[in-house]
Image (spheres, rainbow, N blue to C red):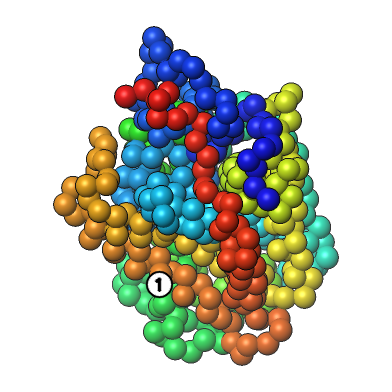
Amino acid sequence: MGNKSETVTPARLDSDHVALEKNSTMSTPVGAGIKMDSGERRLNELGYKQELRREMFPVRRASWSRVGLGGGYFLHVVRGFCNGRNLQQFPGSLYFWAAHLAGPKWGPLASWICAWLETIGLVAGIGTQAYAGTQTLQNIILLSTGTNKNGGYLAPRSVFLAIYIGLCLIWAVLNSFALNLIALIDIVSMWWQVVGGTLIVVLLPLVATSTQSASYVFTKLEISSDATGITSPVYSVLLSWLVSQYSLYGYDAAAHLTEETKNADKNGPLAILSSIGMISVFGWAFILALIFSIQDPAYLYDPTNETAGRFVPAQILYDAFYGRYQSGTGAIILLVVIWGSFFFAGLSITTSAARVVYALSRDGGVPGSRVLRKVDRRVQVPVNAVWFSCAFAIILGLPILKLDVVFTAITSICTIGWVGGYAVPIFARMVIKSENFKRGPFHLGGASRWICLVAFLWICYTCVIFLLPTSYPIKLETFNYAPVALGVVLAAVMGWWMVDARHWFKGPVREIFLGDAIA
């Protein structure tokens, strides 16, 4: 197993994983006499060759497009500082950071765990956006055809699943074209979310005939026991943090695109922190606009309401516009804005998922690596990895036909995988000797280990909470299958490591060796 004697695909699609064979080292120093920016120089120092054209992806725009509208909190900023510091030191993705921070002895295991967690998170991330987009479209159709009260069409489970699969297939098709197309769509995505998010935040409270008081918004605890079966206020508060964890992932897109970014060792960390900052502001504003505009809290989950109690944001929008204009048209338009946010985020996450699957397959870390590592020479895209990622996202959504908590389960798998991937390099930085860590232009000084500790503990808390049930009583329809799905996959991955992979998997493979790197 492994890839020691295989021919290497000529195109490099992730800045941490284009490896040339050891017998193809260059006879002259890489970049001799060639002017390069600081990001490319750092990449060469770490043993990796610049292959992709820089500036293809403005990295802040890419990070923003993958995060989407949602809510954020202070502890995300703490985690962002840790990841930004790692990115400026090691321009590449999480898998790359873990390998270098853990050192020669533990690097292969650390990168193996990190790569698989990241792969799980990204593939499930496609599913979360597909489900959210499908749910939003379901409500758009329902409100457009007469609402739940007036004979509107509420898509049944089979149609819901068909739409879910359709979105995954559309993203796979679009990601099978040249990267310039995805870069163009990222521009549209950014402006769609900025303009559309601002429109919702400003317009909704103005349209609502009445608004909730500040004391209600900031101090009232609504458990909604009739809808969830949960009666404990403490348990409800613990679960309430989940929305910020799910909505604020994806800013590590800056790491996946470092090779296409000029001065990535500086702009990468700035992209991570600025995307967290922007989405935190927009997310808070979006959530506050919704909560302030609630007309009747008890009506939101009522199965007889206009949206069949299926999607609270849609009901809030409908109540506001119908109360003012006796028409739900405005709510439908704003739901289209929200749907667009999910669509663009899903498209971008598919891009990242394919890159990570491709990267891991380059080192033989995925079953069928020989197929998944192939790149379409016409468009320089790992098409097989794209379709592999979307296929597994579709498989994750199949329980839609029977279960009511599919979104919770897929979101749990996604977030645990993603933030678990963050945890590996953060923990490695906590235990690495200071003299073995070279500071770059972005660093945390003496507070580094304390900040990493806070971030690591927060990630551990997050992973535990996402494994808990969100609906009671627990039965087949409300069972959160995330612990089972994650347990099976992780057990298989670690079993593979113990039995076989530890003998040949060495993590990211260098393509420039010490004699060739530029000092």
Label 1 neighbourhood size at 10 Å, few (<14), some (14-19), many (20+)?
A: few
> What residue is rendered at 49% in x and 17% in y?
27
- Is residue 259 visible in the rendered image? The answer is no
What residue would you read off at disc 1? 461
Numbered circles on residues, count: 1
**Residue 328 as seen in the image, left or right of residue 69:** right
Name the foreground residue: 364 vs 228: 364
**Residue 65 as seen in the image, left or right of residue 281:** right
> What residue is rendered at 52% in x and 49% in y?
506
**Residue 312 as seen in the image, left or right of residue 452:** right
Name, please, the residue furthest toward the left: 446
**Which part of the image, by quadrant, shows the C terminus?**
top left
List x then y, in percent, for residue 464: 46, 75
Instruction: Determine whether 479 is above or below 391 in the image.
Output: below
Name the foreground residue: 310 vs 11: 11
Identify the image quadrant of residue 117: bottom right
- Disc 1 is placed on an element classified as helix
> What residue is rendered at 38% in x and 40% in y?
90
List x then y, in percent, for residue 134: 70, 57
- Is residue 473 visible in the rendered image? The answer is yes
List x then y, in percent, for residue 206: 44, 53
Name the foreground residue: 247 vs 176: 176
The amino acid beneath tag 1 is Tyr
Name the foreground residue: 21 vs 432: 21
Identify the image quadrant of residue 309: bottom right
> What residue is rendered at 27% in x and 45% in y?
437
List x then y, in percent, for residue 491: 61, 71
